[in-house]
Image (spheres, helix red, strand yellow):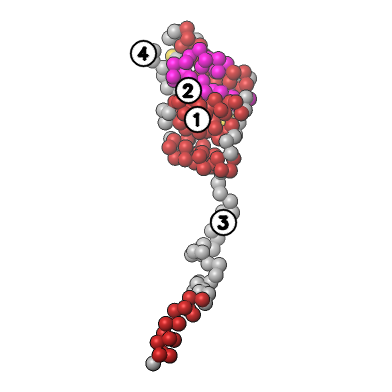
Amino acid sequence: MSRFIFAFLLLPIITACEPVQSPLGPTHVGPKAKKGSVVITEAIDGLVVGHRLMASGEYELALKAYNRSVAKNGLSADVLSALGSANLHLQRLGQAETLLRAAVKKDKMFAAAWNNLGVVLSSTGQLNEAALVFRIAFGLDSGKSDEIRMNLTTALAKLDKKVYVEGQELEEFELVRRGNGRFLLLRTPYSDS
């Protein structure tokens, strides 16, 4: 009887030492993909995802995607500018200004970041510096972007307290982001109140 008890007590110890194999095999990690499925071998860049989310108005999600892109891209001028732009849309103007200043410090030739910094400065009432920053953006862009030109014109008009610029109603500032060499800008009518 003592042998039976000894063997009964020893059984869990022996089975614990044996390797346990999954019934699905050692390399199986989940269900198999259907035949013909697209295989993703690397993650999509968070910067690209963030730009798409910004375009669809999902600014909080875009901010999260931009933060994830820091792991891949580091704090490059593109990432800093994207983070600043997302914060600007979320009305976090202090954070936006800090990030955009860091972006233009890293890449002094980044016209879109200069423009977005001008938007922040204008939004916080720093019109003199905003006009200067828009001039820098306009110069870097060589006057190619109508949106940057309009932001500069509007800033100068705000400084001069003019209601109309070349017979047009003034417009509020909006963001410009760099992507595929294009500048995108949404404009809303300006009211001087």
Taking 23 as reference, is 127 above or below it? above
Q: Residue at x 53, y 67 (%)?
A: 28
Check if mark 3's residue and mark 4's residue have beta carbons within 8 Å: no
Q: Nearer the viewer, residue 116 or 168?
A: 116
- Whether residue 183 appears in this view of the structure is no
Rendered-image quadrant of the N terminus: bottom left
Q: Secondary structure at mark 1?
A: helix
Contact check, label 1 and label 2, Cβ < 8 Å:
yes
Residue 19, x across and y down, in percent: 53, 74
Name the residue beneath numbered marker 2.
Answer: 120
Farthest residue to the left: give it: 193
Residue stretch in magenta = 109-135
The disc, 3 or 1, on the residue closer to the chain's N-terminal end is 3
Mark 3 belongs to which amino acid? Val
Q: Which residue is mark 1?
A: 84
In the rendered image, the residue lying farthest to the front is 2
Q: Amino acid at mark 4?
A: Ser
Residue 163 is covered by the magenta coloring: no
Calculate the distance from the C-alpha at mark 1 to the C-alpha at mark 4.
27 Å
Q: Which residue is mark 4?
A: 193
Pointer 2 or 3: first along the chain: 3
